[in-house]
Image (cartoon, rainbow, N blue to C red):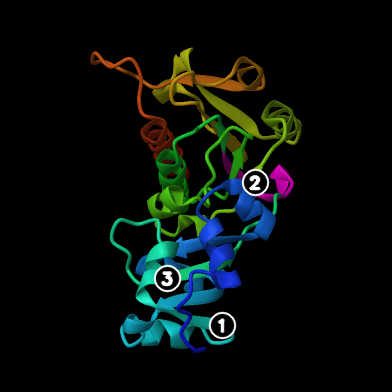
């Protein structure tokens, strides 16, 4: 472990502090910070950590984690420097510095995909990634309006799923979905005027479930690319479901069918 970094004016500290400010800065640096003990452990376990940042007074606590991270730098930071890097109300004294993933072609993400059309709440994006990880979905597509899955709030909500489920942004989500449909994917969209969800036929081997914006739903251009439009039943007074909840219901029902 290197000598303790104590100055907020340290050039590395300035660069690290900027990572929590905006997606543009994360893309520019090609890095993001995964803060907290669980996220740092997940980053190390999945070989996604480029470096570890540990509060100097917590070095004994995270000694085992530092040992697991052999081959990458481990920086010791004074308490006030670590606090300045933290987005959490109660900093845990550790963070992993990780590479910001580059976008890739949607058809390289596997056979079970989720597409997000303007999902702007980072908590929803992170929760969807966490559910995808649990339910065996293989890749996430996003349009440019979606919240960044590598922002602090989304990372916390993903509970490490972000390290196991690749995500990519599409300049034109409708066009990307059209290409996937041409390659044999079933493009499944939630639609208040769609067919009953639980009366659908057997799913194709390759599927992509589209989840729309929290308020406006799925945009018309994206909805046009759907090869299957389905409506989840709502028997109470609610007008709609939370985006992450609706996504979880659909994902797990397709998993039930696959396992059945």
Badge 3 vs badge 2, beta-carbon distance below 8 Å:
no
Would residue 125 be seen by someone viewing this image from the given angle? yes
Neighbor class of circle 2 (other Cα within 10 Å; few <14, some 14-19, many 20+) is some
Residue 192 position in % (x across, y down): 44, 13
Extreme residue toward the top, this view: 193
Foreground label between 3 and 2: 3
Neighbor class of circle 3 (other Cα within 10 Å; few <14, some 14-19, many 20+) is some
Would residue 205 be seen by someone viewing this image from the given angle? no
Tag 1 secondary structure: loop
Q: Classify residue 189 by image quadrant.
A: top right
Tag 2 secondary structure: strand
Give whichever of discs 1 and 3 has the lower sequence position. 1
Query: Who is closer to the viewer here, 75 or 247?
Result: 75
* Left or right for 25, reference 61: right
Determine which residue is flagged by label 3: 81
Residue at x 48% of width, y 80% of height: 5
Q: Classify residue 54 by image quadrant.
A: bottom left
Is residue 100 inside the magenta stretch? no
Determine which residue is flagged by label 2: 168
Foreground label between 1 and 3: 3
Give whichever of discs 2 and 1 has the lower sequence position. 1
Determine which residue is flagged by label 1: 73
Residue at x 39% of width, y 31% of height: 246
* C-alpha span from label 1 to label 3: 17 Å
Image quadrant where one finds the C terminus: top left
Extreme residue toward the left, this view: 236
Give the magenta part as a residue range. 104-114
Foreground label between 2 and 1: 1
């Amino acid at each position: 472990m290197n000598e303790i970094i104590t100055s907020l004016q340290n050039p590395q500290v300035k660069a690290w502090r900027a990572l929590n400010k905006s997606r543009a800065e994360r893309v520019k640096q090609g890095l993001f910070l995964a803060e907290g003990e669980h996220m740092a452990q997940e980053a190390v376990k999945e070989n996604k950590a480029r470096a570890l940042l540990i509060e100097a007074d917590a070095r004994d606590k995270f000694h085992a984690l530092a040992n697991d991270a052999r081959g990458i730098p481990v920086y010791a930071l004074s308490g006030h420097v670590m606090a300045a890097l933290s987005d959490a109300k109660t900093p845990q004294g550790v963070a992993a510095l990780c590479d910001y993933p580059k976008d890739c072609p949607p058809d390289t993400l596997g056979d079970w995909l989720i597409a997000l059309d303007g999902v702007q709440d980072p908590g929803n994006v992170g929760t969807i990634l966490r559910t995808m990880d649990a339910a065996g979905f293989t890749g996430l597509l996003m349009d440019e309006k979606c919240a960044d899955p590598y922002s602090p709030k989304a990372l916390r909500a993903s509970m490490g799923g972000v390290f196991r489920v690749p995500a990519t942004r599409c300049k034109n989500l409708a066009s990307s979905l059209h290409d996937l449909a041409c390659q044999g994917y079933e493009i499944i969209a939630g639609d208040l005027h769609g067919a009953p969800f639980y009366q659908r036929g057997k799913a194709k081997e390759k599927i992509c479930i589209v989840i729309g914006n929290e308020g406006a739903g799925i945009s018309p251009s994206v909805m046009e690319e759907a090869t299957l439009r389905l409506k989840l039943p709502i028997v109470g007074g609610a007008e709609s479901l939370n985006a992450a909840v609706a996504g979880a219901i659909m994902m797990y029902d397709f998993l039930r069918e696959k396992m059945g």
